[in-house]
């Protein structure tokens, strides 16, 4: 468990993202594990690029928040989970849904607003759900998922299961009251929940240090929830370190708080600037150049003779193919029916009384 | 008169009132360095400095409570909600504190607070980001609620709201920020709360509406005119206080009314208007009052279903024809 001063934390943050560290844990990863992580990240990158393109030509609408630059967080934190473990996230969740096993066609179809989408086209980019594989949703209100995660963990605890619930949140969400209420309850009831902050250092245009006096890793201390700092750009570290946390929680260690340090390469959403007064173009270029999670992993694998450029090209081709098929599927899928609007507002029709008051006849 | 956007009209109102009264300050997410998520506060940080234009953490409950406390000691906070969807996190401070402070303290304190930001749906933002929040606030004595639909009304109402000694909820719309219109100049351009505005005069049917929906009403009125039906378009502007006089006057003339609002029907603005008409204009009515609202569902993401769910010109035309029996 890391407990350091905020100055040390700041320094650590500056250093860690650009210079991936190899530890004994990461060196112990097998070739198969590394290839799996690479394939996952390639899929996420190509998927998000496609989503960006489709947004630009109006096939996807609304708010669309890409995960480009942060792929190692989805791959590294979710790959160690079992199918019956749970993940719940924010509106920046497309790749997390993929990582947990939601089919790419269904996610893409949701982005396209089609009936074959995960929410039948009614949810959209911010609300991908795949409860059959333990993906408990994308949530649009900052902090809205934190207490919900608590309830999911409560359910596990109540039934005496050994699953864990991973709750992703952005760095800006720790300033919501719900964060503190949730950590406190998780702690007093020793619930199997991991609060994983995707700490990309910005909430829209606000740098974390402008809205917090203390370092991220100190946020859970007063609740008695252990904190850890993890490199979220070097997927080998993310995977090895986060996997360890998962196993501890599975064995009953109780709630954990993980500061997964990462960086967003694109704007906050498709309609926000990549850089501006809040972060310089140079900073983004520097990170994109030196902290690309895919490049970091590939470089390591090339150096260790675990990957050849041809193999990489082949894997990338496969990822592109999967995404292409997902987009074609989404494109061809039918629009949802107007009736579907009323289908899930309530779980069943009520035999007595009136539920809907718009007077519309369909 | 200068033609400016709704966004700039709000910006001017803020700047003028901050200039006029040192106790006015603006706080909210991204309002300072980022110039506001929708750029309403553009340039204000530069002009008034970080003492008076304050970027907050994403802590709606906390910074709204801050406004309540600051008002108790004589300041006049303007809280920007990035959108009103997020104001729901602050409802406790607004409903349990701001709205009650005056009566709870026997008049020892007041809450001169403005709570403003966009409300209602834009395009395809899905159910959590497309809510018309009027009804949440209207229900509560102690709060005032306004919803300007034009640049001039935006400026005049916001300025009045800032000078008002009670908490005033000012509901803007993402769809209006770029709308241009003539706005009277001068620091004393104020629009009183509780005064509706007849945006179009007709004699056959009263369309009673507010906010962004006035533009739907005006388009419907044009279509109706082609069919020989002339509509009054009464823009309530202020939802609480409600200009009952103007409602009765218009309906007294037309004998028919349709209430149009962007939000859900159950317990909406129109529910109250209909109730007033039943109680005070029963004898004037020649047809049941109809309402055109959003479909009674969480707003869907899908483009076509979203368009279907929103109140439309065609639905309004249909309702007006129905009450006119044409
Ligand atoms: C309660 C609430 N307030 C404001 C917003 C608007 N908003 C959406 S995302 C965001 C920034 C969140 O940043 P962070 O938590 O760091 O996540 P990131 O976007 O960096 O992944 C804001 C202010 C919101 N969705 N919900
Ligand atoms: Mg962030």
Image (spheres, helix red, strand yellow):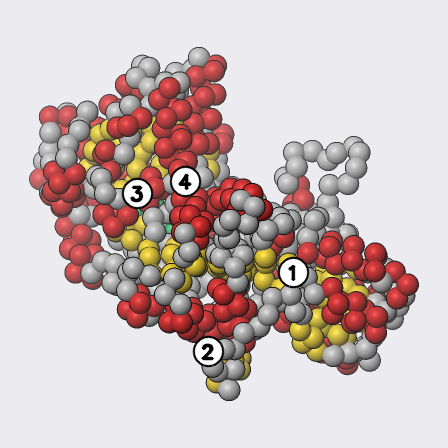
Report if the CB atoms under discs 4 and 1 are less than 8 Å apart: no
Residue at the spot of label 1:
B241
Between marks 4 and 2, how big is the CA–CA gap?
A: 40 Å
Residue at the spot of label 2:
B187
Circle 1: is it few (<14), some (14-19), or many (20+) Cα within 10 Å? some
- Residue depicted at 14% across the width and 35% down the height: A5
Between marks 3 and 1, how big is the CA–CA gap?
A: 41 Å
**Residue most toward the top?**
A160
Q: Quadrant of residue A63?
A: bottom left
- Residue depicted at 41% across the width and 52% down the height: B73
- Which chain does tag 3 point to? A
Between marks 4 and 3, how big is the CA–CA gap?
A: 10 Å
Residue B105 in the image, given as x and y percentages of width and height: 53, 44
Does the Cβ of the disc 4 residue fall within 8 Å of ligand 1? yes
- In the shown orientation, is residue B285 left or right of residue B291? right
- Which chain does tag 2 point to? B
Classify A330 as above or below A85. below
Q: Which quadrant holds the N terminus of chain A?
A: top left
Task: For mark 3, give the secondary structure.
Answer: helix
Mark 4 or 1: in front is 1
- Which chain does tag 4 point to? A
Report if the CB atoms under discs 4 and 2 are less than 8 Å apart: no
Does the Cβ of the disc 3 residue fall within 8 Å of ligand 1? yes
Discs 3, 1: same chain: no
């Amino acid at each position: 468990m890391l407990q350091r001063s905020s100055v040390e934390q700041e320094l650590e943050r500056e250093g860690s993202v650009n210079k991936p560290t190899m530890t004994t844990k990461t060196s112990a990863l097998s070739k198969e594990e590394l290839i799996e992580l690479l394939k996952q990240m390639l899929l996420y990158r190509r998927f998000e690029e496609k989503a960006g393109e489709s947004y630009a030509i109006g096939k996807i609408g609304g708010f669309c928040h890409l995960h480009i630059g942060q792929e190692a967080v989805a791959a590294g934190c979710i790959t160690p989970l079992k199918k019956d473990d749970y993940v719940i996230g924010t509106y920046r969740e497309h790749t997390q849904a993929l990582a947990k096993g939601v089919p790419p066609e269904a996610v893409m179809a949701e982005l396209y607003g089609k009936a074959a989408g995960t929410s039948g086209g009614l949810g959209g980019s911010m609300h991908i759900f795949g409860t059959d594989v333990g993906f408990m949703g994308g949530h649009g209100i900052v902090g809205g998922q934190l207490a919900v995660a608590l309830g999911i963990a409560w359910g596990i605890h109540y039934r005496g299961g050994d699953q864990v619930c991973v709750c992703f949140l952005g760095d800006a969400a720790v300033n919501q009251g719900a964060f503190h209420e949730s950590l406190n309850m998780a702690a007093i009831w020793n619930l199997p929940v991991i609060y994983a902050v995707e700490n990309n250092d910005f909430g829209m245009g606000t740098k974390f240090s402008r809205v917090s006096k203390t370092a991220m890793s100190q946020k859970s201390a007063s609740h008695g929830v252990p904190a850890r700092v993890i490199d979220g750009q070097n997927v080998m570290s993310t995977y090895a370190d986060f996997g360890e946390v998962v196993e501890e929680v599975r064995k009953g260690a109780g709630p954990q708080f993980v500061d997964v340090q990462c960086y967003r390469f694109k704007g906050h959403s498709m309609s926000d600037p990549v850089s501006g007064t809040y972060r310089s173009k140079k900073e983004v270029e520097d990170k994109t150049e030196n902290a690309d999670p895919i490049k970091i992993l590939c470089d390591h694998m090339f150096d260790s003779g675990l990957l050849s450029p041809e193999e990489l090209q082949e894997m990338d081709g496969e990822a592109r193919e999967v995404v292409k098929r997902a987009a074609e599927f989404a494109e061809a899928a039918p629009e949802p029916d107007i009736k579907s609007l009323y289908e899930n507002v309530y779980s069943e029709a009520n035999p007595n009384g009136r539920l809907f008051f718009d007077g519309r006849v369909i | 008169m200068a033609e400016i956007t709704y966004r700039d009209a709000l910006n001017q109102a803020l700047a003028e009132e901050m200039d006029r009264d040192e106790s006015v300050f603006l706080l909210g997410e991204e309002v300072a360095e980022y110039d506001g998520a929708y750029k309403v506060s553009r340039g204000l940080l530069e002009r008034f400095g970080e003492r008076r234009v304050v970027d907050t953490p994403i802590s709606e409950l906390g910074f709204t409570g801050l406004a309540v406390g600051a008002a108790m000691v004589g300041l006049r906070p303007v809280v920007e909600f990035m959108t009103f969807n997020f104001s729901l996190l602050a409802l406790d401070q607004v409903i349990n504190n701001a709205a009650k402070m005056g009566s709870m303290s026997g008049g020892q304190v007041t809450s001169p607070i403005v709570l403003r930001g966009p409300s209602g749906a834009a395009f395809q933002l899905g159910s959590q980001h497309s809510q018309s929040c009027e009804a949440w606030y209207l229900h509560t004595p102690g709060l005032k609620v306004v919803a300007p639909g034009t640049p001039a009304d935006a400026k005049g109402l916001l300025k009045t709201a800032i000078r008002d000694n009670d908490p005033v909820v000012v509901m803007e719309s993402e769809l209006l920020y770029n709308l241009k219109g003539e706005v009277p100049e001068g620091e004393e351009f104020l629009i009183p709360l509780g005064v509706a505005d007849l945006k179009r005069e007709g004699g056959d049917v009263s369309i009673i509406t507010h906010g962004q929906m006035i533009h739907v009403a005006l388009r419907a009125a044009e279509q109706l005119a082609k069919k020989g039906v002339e509509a009054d378009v009464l823009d309530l502007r202020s939802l609480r206080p409600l200009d009952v006089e103007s409602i009765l006057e218009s309906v007294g003339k037309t004998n028919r009314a349709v209430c149009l609002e962007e939000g859900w029907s159950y317990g909406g603005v129109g529910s109250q208007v209909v109730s007033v008409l039943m109680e005070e204009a029963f004898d004037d009515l020649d047809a049941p009052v109809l309402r055109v609202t959003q479909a009674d569902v969480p707003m869907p993401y899908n483009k076509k279903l979203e368009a279907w769910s929103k109140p439309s010109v065609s639905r309004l035309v249909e309702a007006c024809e129905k009450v006119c029996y044409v």
